[in-house]
Image: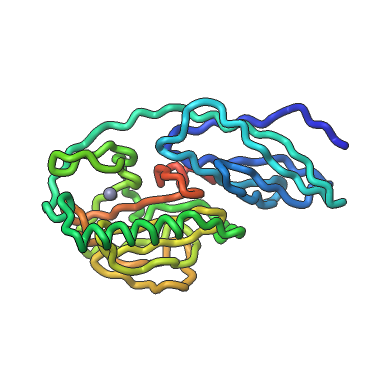
């Protein structure tokens, strides 16, 4: 029995993706991390084990002691611990003006929005036990930056959910590219996000592209990093044309740019 006393510490802001790595050991066959009631596999990449964990916008600040299960070549399972140190992050409040029908929902619109929220949450709760990507995440509109992730929002005077993505400047017709290799799991019009594409990148990592004027992929397609998904537009709840780019990691709402930072 190998007893390891050191525990690994990783720190991350509320609303970010964090890369977790473990050194290579010849007797280790596989590694699984029990993160926020979910099981996230690690992958053997070059000379280490690695995976990405999502720290939600509203994750509790402080030390999250996280069990890590090491399966050894002889079949034994060793439980160790990693510590995810969640740092609090303050996000500003923004006030927005949109078409009233997106704030005072009609009965059918409310039913539709609720049904679609269930559908997308069901997608984000699945953890595909593979890592579909093997290069760093890229920005869907190269060179663009977005700074409004996490903003607490007031629509037409009424508070709504915080902004779970980054808005990138784009005029209607701007080409939108896949942030990384993945599988299309949704490609259709939704009430709030308009024409929407969701990609599954594996390990519980999903990207979402909203308000498109045109969708150029279909459910089931496997797309490469940078592949054209569609064109920017102003469909759904918007104040004007732009790209809303969201990333979910094991269900957690994270700033998409924190994934771009990983692997840099
Ligand atoms: Zn947005």
Number of numbered callouts drawn: 0
Q: How is the image coloured?
A: rainbow
Instruction: Identify the residue shown where x is 44% and y is 62%.
Output: 199
- Foreground residue among 69 and 145: 69
* Residue at the far front in the pictured view: 107
The quarter holding residue 152 reads: top left
Which quadrant would the N terminus be assigned to in this image?
top right
The quarter holding residue 107 reads: bottom left
Instruction: Identify the residue shown where x is 54% and y is 46%.
Output: 263
- Residue 97 in the image: x percent, y percent? 13, 45
Query: In the rendered image of this protein, does residue 117 appear above or below residue 189?
Result: above
- Foreground residue among 206 and 264: 206
**In this rendering, position of residue 213 left or right of residue 226:** left
- Residue 164 in the image: x percent, y percent? 35, 45
Instruction: Identify the residue shown where x is 28% and y is 63%.
Output: 190
- Foreground residue among 131 and 115: 115
- Residue 174 in the image: x percent, y percent? 26, 62
- Foreground residue among 198 and 139: 198
**In this rendering, position of residue 59 left or right of residue 106:** right
- Residue 78 in the image: x percent, y percent? 78, 41
Query: In the rendered image of this protein, does residue 2 appear above or below residue 77?
Result: above
């Amino acid at each position: 029995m190998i007893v390891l006393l050191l525990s690994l510490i990783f720190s991350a802001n509320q609303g970010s993706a964090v890369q977790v790595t473990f050194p290579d050991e010849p007797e280790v066959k596989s590694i699984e991390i029990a993160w926020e009631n979910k099981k996230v596999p690690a992958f053997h990449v070059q000379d280490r084990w690695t995976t990405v964990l999502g720290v939600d916008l509203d994750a509790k600040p402080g030390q999250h002691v996280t069990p890590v299960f090491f399966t050894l070549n002889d079949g034994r399972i060793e439980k160790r611990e990693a510590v995810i140190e969640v740092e609090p992050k303050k996000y500003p409040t923004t006030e927005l003006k949109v078409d009233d029908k997106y704030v005072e929902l009609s009965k059918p619109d409310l039913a539709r929005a609720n049904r679609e929220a269930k559908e997308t949450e069901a997608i984000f709760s699945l953890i595909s036990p593979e890592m579909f990507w093997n290069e760093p995440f890229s920005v869907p509109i190269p060179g663009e930056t977005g700074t409004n992730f996490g903003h607490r929002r007031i629509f037409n005077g009424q508070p709504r959910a915080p902004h779970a993505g980054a808005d990138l400047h784009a005029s209607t017709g701007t080409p939108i590219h896949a942030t990384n290799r993945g599988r299309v799991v949704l490609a259709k019009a939704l009430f709030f996000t308009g024409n929407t594409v969701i990609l599954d990148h594996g390990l519980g990592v999903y990207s979402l592209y909203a308000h498109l004027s045109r969708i150029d992929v279909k459910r089931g397609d496997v797309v490469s990093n940078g592949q054209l998904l569609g064109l920017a537009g102003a469909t759904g709840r918007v104040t004007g044309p732009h790209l809303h780019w969201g990333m979910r990691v094991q269900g957690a709402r994270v700033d998409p740019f924190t994934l771009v930072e990983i692997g840099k």
